[in-house]
Amino acid sequence: MIKFYLRIKAFLKRQFDKIHNEGFKINLLQAIPFWFASLITGLVAVFYAQCFAKAESISRTIFQYEPLLIFVVTPVCFIVSWWIVNQFAPYSKGSGIPQVMAAVELATPKTKDKIKKLLSLRIIAVKIISSIVMVIGGGAVGREGPTIQIAGSIFRKTNELLPAWYPRISKKNMIMTGAAAGLAAAFNTPLGGIVFAVEELTKMHISYFKSAIFTAVIIAGLTAQAFLGSYLYLGYPIVNNVPYTLLFVVVLVAVIAGILGSSMSKIMWIIIKWKRNFNNDYQHIIYLLVCSLTIASLAYFINESVLGSGKAILNTTLFTPDKYTHWYMPLLRIIGPVLSFTTGASGGIFAPGLSAGGCIGSVFSGWFQLSPSDTNILILAGMTAFLTGITRAPFTSAILVLEMTERNNLILHLMLAGMVAGFVSKFVDKHSIYDYIKHQYIEELKIEDNVVRPI
């Protein structure tokens, strides 16, 4: 295998040496790693999505077969999922977005060696396995954030494997492009991936890396579509005769969803900081038992919709006559992610956040007795607002929801919901949970330099 790789590398070098236009040669050489990494990202994202869906199906089957099993399966899966992360790749825990943000910031000559702890092949394996085990146990986590860290790892490794004679490629640009490609492949939202990279990961103007990010998003997205079909993450909800008078209710939903989304993030960060005082694994295991048994009890005694990513709830409220959820559903969809995300296992909060926001819009629609079409508008507005409360990225949230439903006539409503949610979120906390965790990771990695290691 190694000999084959060396022969291919030598062959490619000879071919490129024959090209006399140096500018074209350099541009082509720099583009190839992005194309290759994007293709791999699309394939891994498809594999991960199928495994994740199967895990959710297994979780539902267990609960339907014998509901009492949840009191055994959930604690076991939570502990195993946490143990896998803690034992093999501590920086694979949680969403994965803060790790990518930290890697972007650490992509400097002085700190570039620390990136491999945040983005690596081991991270990919642990991220997938841990989150799948978590979902089988009913954890309220998503795969979208993890896919971003997985994609960042693929792009970083691709950059690392380039031979010494290869034209230099910025590690920062490579990681940011990988993140965009990962989100595009996870949600099938290419524009959302681009906006996410610009709004969430960097203040750099897009002109510095527009070609790389555009081609990476396109290749990763097309690869995912080649295997999964030209699908929408949520389909085509019916929205007819969009009334501008509904904007007042949209603003109300955005205010509530934005406050609740940012409050959920703040609670998560408070718990994560508190857990840093744990001195041994026994304390972590006790916390895992409390979280898992709480989720199991909520599922058994109140409503099983507390389990999983929450995508099934969105499909029910958007595409069936059962439009209105119970008043307590938003609370369940907030409690579930809080207890799951703070365990220290792998799993994201994008999809759970969308489901919580959708439930808020559904509840308000029931109170106002709105039509099915107007209810769908409020559900999508709630999704946008709640995700904005978590990420503090209103344009990314609006574009993601817009692309995953293709309801272009709602662009004003969704942008308004995102902007309002972004404004009110600042009254809860000026920073997102991603910012806090990112700075925590950077601090931990930099402190390692000051630790005297035994000889």
Image: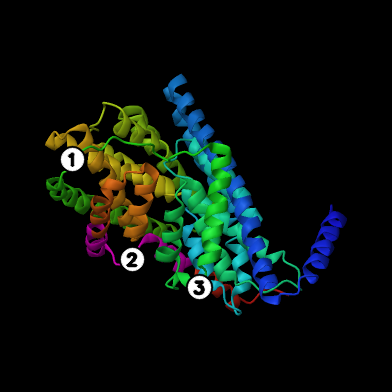
Local crowd at mark 3 within 10 Å, few (<14), some, or many (≥20)? Answer: few
Q: Are marks 1 and 3 in contact (CB under 8 Å)?
A: no
Whether residue 258 can be seen here: yes
Type of amino acid at the residue the image marks with label 2: His
Type of amino acid at the residue the image marks with label 3: Tyr
How was the colour assigned to the protein in this rendering?
rainbow
Relative to the observer, which residue lies in front, 280 or 262? 262
Q: Secondary structure at mark 3?
A: helix
Q: Which mark, residue 364?
A: 1
Q: Quadrant of residue 309?
A: top left
Relative to the observer, which residue lies in front, 290 or 317? 317
Provide the residue designation for mark 2.
431
Whether residue 346 can be seen here: no
- Residue range in magenta is 420-441
* N-term mark: 2 or 1: 1
Q: Are marks 2 and 1 in contact (CB under 8 Å)?
A: no
- Residue at horizontal 86 percent and vertical 59 percent from the top: 7
Provide the residue designation for mark 3.
208
In three-dimensional space, the C-alpha distance between marks 2 and 1, rounded to whole angstroms, equals 27 Å
